Structures are given as C-alpha cells and as structure tokens.
C-alpha cells in the first residue's frame, strides 16, 4: 500500500498546525501573553513614550505584534511595525518609519535631521486630527547604539502636554541587560511599562498544542500528553 506523506490528510487536518509563520489565528493567549498585551495597550492608550516586552526566542513576541495591530483601533491610532535587522543604519531606521507611515521622503536633504522633521510634522498633524502613532519595533536587540539614540530622539517629540507617539520595543531576553549601561540611561528612563514573556509552562504547552490542532481542524486528541 502506498503511504500518504501528507500528515495533514493523515490526521484529518485541513492545514498545518505548527508552521513557522506569523498567523494571529494561531495566537494562543496564555495569562502571560494576555498580561503583556494589556500592558502594552495601556501604554498606547495612556500616551506613554516607551513600552518594552522581552523574552526568549520563540515565546511569541512577533505574534504579540499582530495582536497589538489588531487591537489598536484605526479611529484612535496609526499602528505600524518596524522590523529591525543587523545591517540597518540610523538613517535606514528613520527611512523605514517614513515608508511605513507613508510619509514622503524630503527632497534634497537626506539626513537624520530632515527625516526627523518629516516625522515630527506628520505626528503633529495626526495629533491635531485626534489620532496617535504607535511604532512597534520588533527585533529591537538588533539596533545599534546610534539607532537606539534615534529611538530616544523620537520620544523627545512632544507637545507641552504629552509625547506625540508611543514606541513599543520587542526584544530578546538579553536586551534589558544591555540597557543597564550608562549610555542608555536617558532611554531607559523613558520606559513607562515593561513585561517579560516567560517560556510556556507544561500546562500551557499542552493547551497550546491542543489549541493549534483545534484551529487546524482536529476533531480528536492526537497526542497522549500524560
């Protein structure tokens, strides 16, 4: 007999339950993830300058960004995700923010000051219109010292009453240790709310597996979890 190599078909699933992709449908909300989500939503709604979520690779930071994007109502917020990478310059970081916010790049002057002026102008316009920009920076641990100082510069943009945007940083678990250095004291002082995403417990892992199988179409228990 020819054996099917399609495990989804074999187990009666209509899609793969454990693909390495960012799909909000598969976001299993543990108490820890729910707490991180609520904390960062508060950060945005209370118009704080900076929020920070950190944890080990694979603990759900990127999926959390998708939940934040879905949770931040477009009538109040303009949420965008900036994915940091090791080769990005500080001008590249600001350029990516301009692109994600669909702000035209300045003609003639390609430097950090002109980019910051464009971002500041856009933030003032959206603030006057009753909306708030939320920048979600994923993989923040890849940012260089210069780029982190650009993040601090963005938190300087404000009205006499409050900051003009909220920045939410998501990073690997070593990142807070790096922030302890005195060169980041000003940036560190801007962090109003932070949260550590703990690895899943055994109980959470069991429920996570069951949830993903259910979302993928499983109608029965496929694993003996005892």
Image (cartoon, rainbow, N blue to C red):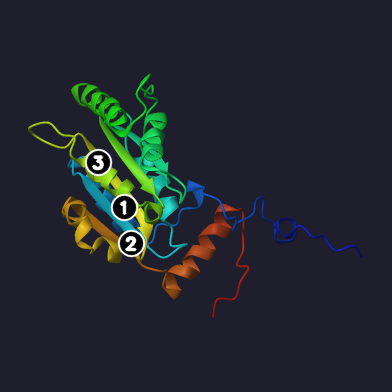
Mark 3 or mark 2: which is in front?
2
Q: Secondary structure at mark 1?
A: helix
70 shown above or below 36:
above
The quarter in which the N terminus is drawn is bottom right
Q: CA distance from mark 3 to mark 1?
A: 20 Å
* Residue named by callout 3: 166
Place of residue 44 in the rendered image (x, y in percent of width and height, measured from the top left): 24, 42
Front in this rendered view, residue 208 or 63: 63
* Up/down of 9 relative to 113, above or below: below
User: In this rendering, is residue 108 above or below 20?
Assistant: above
Quadrant position of residue 8: bottom right
Residue displayed at 43% across by 73% down: 203
Closer to the observer: label 3 or label 1? 1
Q: Position of residue 48 (x, y in %)?
A: 18, 44
Q: Closer to the camera: disc 2 or disc 1?
A: 1
Quick check: marks 3 and 1 in contact, CB under 8 Å? no
Crowd around label 3: few <14 · some 14–19 · many ≥20 (10 Å): many
Name which residue lies at 41% across and 54% down.
142
- Residue 172 lies, in percent from the top left, at 39, 61
Residue 145's label in the rendered image is 1
Using the numbered discs, state the Cα–Cα distance from disc 2 to disc 1 in whole angstroms.
Answer: 12 Å
Mark 1 is surrounded, within 10 Å at the Cα level, by few (under 14), some (14 to 19) or many (20 or more) other residues, namely few
The quarter of the picture where the C terminus appears is: bottom right
């Amino acid at each position: 007999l020819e054996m099917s190599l399609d495990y989804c078909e074999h187990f009666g699933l209509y899609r793969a339950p454990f693909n390495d992709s960012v799909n909000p449908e598969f976001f299993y909300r543990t108490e820890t993830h729910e707490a991180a989500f609520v904390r960062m939503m508060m950060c945005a709604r209370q118009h704080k300058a900076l929020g920070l979520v950190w944890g080990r690779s694979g603990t759900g930071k990127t999926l959390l960004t998708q939940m934040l994007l879905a949770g931040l109502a477009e009538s109040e917020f303009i949420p965008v995700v900036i994915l940091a990478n090791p080769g990005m310059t500080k001008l590249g970081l600001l350029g990516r923010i301009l692109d994600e916010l669909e702000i035209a790049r300045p003609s003639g002057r390609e430097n950090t000051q002109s980019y910051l002026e464009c971002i500041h102008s856009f933030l003032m316009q959206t603030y006057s219109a009753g909306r708030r920009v939320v920048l979600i920076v994923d993989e923040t641990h890849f940012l260089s010292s210069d780029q982190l100082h650009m993040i601090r510069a963005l938190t300087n943009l404000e009205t006499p009453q409050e900051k003009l945007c909220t920045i939410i940083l998501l990073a690997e678990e070593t990142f807070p240790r790096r922030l302890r250095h005195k060169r980041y004291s000003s940036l560190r002082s801007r962090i109003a709310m932070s949260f550590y995403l703990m690895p899943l417990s055994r109980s959470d892992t069991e429920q996570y597996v069951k949830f993903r199988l259910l979302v993928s179409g499983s109608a029965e228990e496929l694993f003996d979890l005892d």
